[in-house]
Image: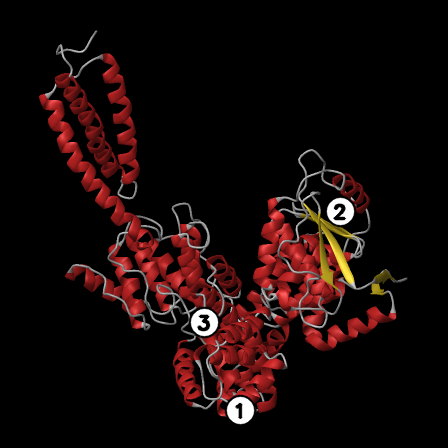
Amino acid sequence: MSYVISIWKQPEDLPWPGSLKEAVEQLRLLFKRPGPPDAACQRLLERLARRYPDFAEDDEEGEGPWLEGLQDVLPSDVPVFNFGLMSGDHLDAAQACVVSEAVALGLNVFDDQAGELHLGHGVSLGLDDRAACVTALDALALRDHALAASRLQPALRQGNRMARELLADLYLRGQGVRQDQAAAAALGLSALAWKTGEDRRLRPADEASQAKVRQWRQAVGEASFALASAWMARLLPPPAGQAARHDPADVLAQAAADLDQRLQALEQRIRQTPGLAPWDDMHALAQRGHPTAQYLASLMLTEGRGVAADPAQALQWLRRAARAGHPLGLYNLAWHHEQGQDLPQDLQAARRLYGLSARAGCAPALAALRNLEQRLADAPVDPGGLRQAAEAGDAAAQLRLGEALLDGAPGLPRDPALGHDWVLRAARQGLAEAQHIMGSLCLKGEGRPADLQGAVYWWGLAAAQGHADALCNMGLAHYRGEGTAVNRPQARQCFLRAAQGGNAAALHNLGILARQGHLGGPPDPVLGGALQLAAGQRGHRGPAPPLPPESLQEAQRLAADLAPDTDVVAWLERRLGRAPGGAGATGPGPAAAPAPAASAPRSRVPAGSADGNAPDPTDPDPAARPAAKGRDGLTRALLALGCFGLLGLLLLQPPTWAFRVGAVGVTVAAALGGWRVASHRGRAAQLLCAVVCALPGLGLLICAMALLRTLRPGGDDPA
C-alpha cells in the first residue's frame, strides 16, 4: 500500500495556512496553478538520497522506504509535489525523515492520513501530540539526542504530553541532556492524567496512570520520587485557555542546580572527614542520576568503604555511570569487559567503551585502546560469524565487516562496493564511527563516486554525536569552504570540541589559528607554538613551530602545562583572559564534546584532519595556500608593470582631457584590483599594492597615446 504526503513551497501571494482545513483549500488552489515545484524540492530529493542512496534497488520486500525512485519524479505541471512512501514498519521513521529534511529547506508538508501539517517556518499543527514532535523523532532516529532535546523544548512549553514522555526518557538515560532521574520522573509524571481529590490533592485519574506512577517510583527510588512529586505540579500543562505559570525550562534548570548543590555539599563533607564516606548521602545522589555519585558509589561498593562490599551492586552503579558518559566509569567498565572480570569477556565492547572514555578526556583509556586495537588486529577474522552478526542487524558487526571488505582480509576478498554498503548500513543505524568513515569514503570515492557534500553530511551527523575525528574534519571543511561555505568561527568551534575529545590534529590546527589571530585577540606565535607542541606530545606528526629560541622555550613551558587530561577550553580561557573566540565572545567556550556511540578511530580520513597530517603551520593561511601563491605572483607582475608605467609618466606628456578621463578610470580600476589582491595582508599592504597597481594603468595608456602621436601625421592631436 502507498502513503502519500504533499510538499510545496509557500507562495508569496498566499497567507500561511493556520489549520488543516486551510491547508487543504490552499492545496486545491495550487493544483490549479501551472508551473513546476520549487527548486528546494529537488534539493530535498538529493538530501533524502544521501540518507538512503540505495533506494532504487529496494522494493516492497526490501528495506527501502520510498514508493518510487527519487530521481526524475518531480512533476512539471503543478507546484505541489506528491511524495509516496511505502507502508510498513519503517513508515513512521520515513515520514519523520521527509518532514525534518523538508522543513529544514523551508518547505511545507501536509500529511492527510496522519492529520499533520508542518510549515516551512517551523510551526506544526496536527490532530494529536505527535505533530509537534516529528522533527525530534527524526533526530532520535539519527541518535542526535542533543538536537532532539532542543527540538522538544517548544512542544514542552505548549504542554505537549508526548514531548514530556520523550524528554523524560532522555533525562532518565542522560542522552543529549544531563542525567537527572528526579527531573525525568517529574516530566514523566506530568505527562500522566491527574485529578483533584476531595482533599484537594492531585491523584492519578485512571488505572493506567496509577501503574505508571508505581513504575516511576520503583525506577528512581524514594528520594528522587519525592523531589519529582514536588516539581511535577509546576510542570503540569495549564488548563485550556490559560497561560502556564512556570516555564518548564526554568523548573529543569532549578533541578540541575539543586543536584549540583547537593553534590558540592557532599564533596565538602568528604574533604572535611577523610576516610569516612557518607554512604547514605552518596547513595541518594546516585539514585538521582548524578554520574560522579554513581561512579563513587561503585567504588565504595567494590572496596567496601563505608558500606558492605557488593561486587554485583557495584557493577550496576558502574554501568549507570558509564551510560551517563562518566570518563572513569567508561574506562572501568571497559576494563571489566576486556579482562572478563564479573562480566563475560567482550573485546569489541571494551574497544567501544575505551574509545568513548578517551574522547571524554580519560588519558589512560587512550593507551588501553591502542593496546586493545593491536590485540584485535592480530586476532583472525571469522568471516562466517561476522557476516551472520551483520545480517542480524548488529551495527558494530556491519561496520567491522565493511572495513574488512574495504581492506581485504582472510576469507573476505577486497570488495569496495560491498564494503561501502555495509558501512552505510551501520551509519544509518546512527553509529558515529560508521558515519565518520562514510564521510571519508564519500570524499575519496571508495565504492561509489566521490561526493564532497555527502562527506560533509555524514561528518556532520558523526560530529553531532561528539566524534572527535569527524569534528576535526568538519572544522577543516568550514575553514577551507570544501562542501560547505567558509565559516571560520564555526571551524574554530569544531576544532575546540575535537581537541576536547582528544584529537591531536585539532589541537595542532588550533595552534595555526592562534598564530593567525583567528583564536581571539592578535596573532600569538607563542600560544600557537605551545598548542602545536602539545599536539606533538599527543602523537601528532607535524613540523615544529618556527620560533626563535627564547619564544620556543616559553612555548615548551606552556605545552608542559597542557597535559593530556587538561580541559583545553579552560586552559585557553586562562591564557587569553576570555573564551576562545572572536573579540565579542562573552560566555564560556564550547562544552566538552558529548561521548559518541562509536568504536575506536579508523584511518580512513582525509589528509590534514585526523590522520596526523594537519595543514603546514609555516603557511600564513593553510586553507588558502594555492590562492595566496597566485596572489603573490600577480602582485610581483603588477609591480614590474608599475615600474614601466612610472617611467612612462616621467618621460611623456599627457594628451587631451578625454585621455585624462580614460586614464583615471583605468587607474581606479587597477587600484581596486590591487586592493583586492592584497586583501589577506592587512590595510597597509593593501594601500601600497593599490598604489603600485594604479601606476601601470596610467603609464600604459600614456605610452599607447604617445605611440599614436608618433604614427599620426601632423604631430599633435586635434583640439
- Residue at the spot of label 3: 359
- Counting from the top left corner in percent of width and height, residue 487 is at 43, 50
Q: Residues within 10 Å of mark 2 (few under 14, many from 20)?
A: few
Q: Quadrant of residue 649?
A: top left
Relative to 20, is 317 above or below? below
Marks 1/2 in contact by CB < 8 Å: the verdict is no
Relative to 474, is 398 above or below? below
The quadrant in which the C terminus is found is top left
Q: Amino acid at mark 1?
A: Gln
Would you say 557 lies left or right of 571 here? Answer: left
Q: Amino acid at mark 2?
A: Ala
- Counting from the top left corner in percent of width and height, residue 207 is at 87, 71
Q: Residue at x 26, y 31 (%)?
A: 671
Relative to 341, is 592 above or below? above
What is the secondary structure assignment of the residue under circle 3?
Answer: helix
Would you say 451 lies left or right of 566 here? Answer: right
What is the secondary structure assignment of the residue under circle 1?
Answer: loop
Between discs 1 and 3, the one toward the N terminus:
1
Between discs 1 and 2, the one toward the N terminus:
2
- Quote the CA–CA distance across marks 2 and 3: 43 Å
Q: Amino acid at mark 3?
A: Arg
- Counting from the top left corner in percent of width and height, residue 116 is at 76, 53
Q: Residue at x 40, y 70 (%)?
A: 502
- Residue at the spot of label 2: 243
